[in-house]
Image (cartoon, rainbow, N blue to C red):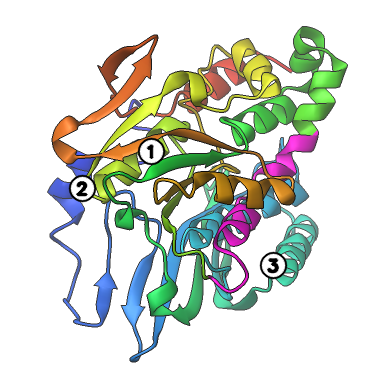
Amino acid sequence: MSDTLGKINLDFFKDVISEKTGHQRSEVKTGPEFGVDVSVIDLSSEMAMVLTSDPLSLIPTLGLKESAWLSVQLMANDMATTGFAPMYGQFVLNLPEKFSKKDFQVYWDHIHRFCQDTGISITGGHTGFIEGQNSTIAGGGTFISVVPKDKVKLSKYAREGDVILVTKSCAISSAAILAMSFPKTVQNKAGMENYHRACESFYDTSSLKDALVAVGSAKSHEKITAMHDVTEGGVLGAIYELAIASNNGALIYDEKLPVGELQKEVCSLFSLDPRYCIGAGAMVITCNAGSEQEIIAGLEKENIPCSTVGRITNKNEGINLVQNDKHTSLNYVENDPYWEAYFKALNAGWK
């Protein structure tokens, strides 16, 4: 297995991409930036277009409905960090040659329904069947919204002194997908109840509601400064990215990180640390110091757990994890351990 699986790191981004972004247009206010979920294009004195792109999932062992859910929700999670829901969607599908048109119809019906439920109008793209395409990534998509530009949240807007919040739990998506991919193993080793609970948690992998509840229906919660959704690298990776994007440091208290017993149990079967593995469904939020309890209370009214886990610090202080009163520099995990665990279990014949 390649040691370069997963997202590129900061150094690679700086060396290869950041200074080579095509023609420079003045209306592009936020282009490609490490740790920033969306791009922002100025449209007028009041409005901006925000865009985000992500791979599309097609995972036969997971199911067509579940793959469609991930395809829609992982992009929606990125858009959610702005404080707004996605409005328009483009889909580019490069499908395996042996993927039947009947199965594609089922898959696309679910894409349509999830977009419809989220308020997304599908505006175009490309669909084709490709020889040699055997990946669980079936192409890519882009979500777009047109929103008041003075209301847009970006991960790079976090400020020194802000409190760091995390919704729900670490490793929501990792635990759910591993349980669904290796049902017999999880049933035998973690028990039938934990297996069913892990499968049910799959639909907690959307953090769109988290973000929209946090900012409020009028997008008026100015005490929230930034948001960043949790993907590869887990909750700790997401906080690291947010700190880098905002040119700050961070202090994170390990004992305050939310790790549900269910996620801990499933991850332990695959020798995974839930703090560092893919965690779609959780949202990292930064807010003005003193406002955290108000934000937490608002989320909890909608049955969304939220924890205070640290604060944003000066860049010169670095990004640090506090464990048993000891400060250690947090290293960015370039290769999410989830992938190795998944393929190791698959190659070992786990069922």
> Label 3 neighbourhood size at 10 Å, few (<14), some (14-19), many (20+)?
some
Residue 318 in the magenta stretch? The answer is no
Which residue is more in the foreground, 95 or 17? 17
Quick one: SS at disc 1? helix
Question: What distance separates the C-alpha of mark 3 from that of mark 1?
Answer: 27 Å
The location of residue 298, given as percent across then percent down, is 65, 52
For the C terminus, the image quarter is top right
Q: Which mark is residue 239?
A: 1
Q: Which mark is residue 118?
A: 3
Q: Most extreme residue toward the front, as rendered?
A: 290
Residue under circle 2?
Answer: 247
Between disc 2 and disc 3, whose residue precedes? 3
The location of residue 156, given as percent across then percent down, is 30, 55
In the figure, 113 relative to 317: above or below? below
Quick one: SS at disc 3? helix
Between disc 3 and disc 1, whose residue precedes? 3
> Is 318 placed left or right of 196 in the picture?
left
- For the record, the magenta segment spans 200-219
Which residue is more in the foreground, 192 or 17? 192
Question: What distance separates the C-alpha of mark 2 from that of mark 3?
Answer: 33 Å
Question: What distance separates the C-alpha of mark 1 from that of mark 2?
Answer: 12 Å
Q: Quadrant of residue 170?
A: top right
Which residue is more in the foreground, 96 or 249? 249
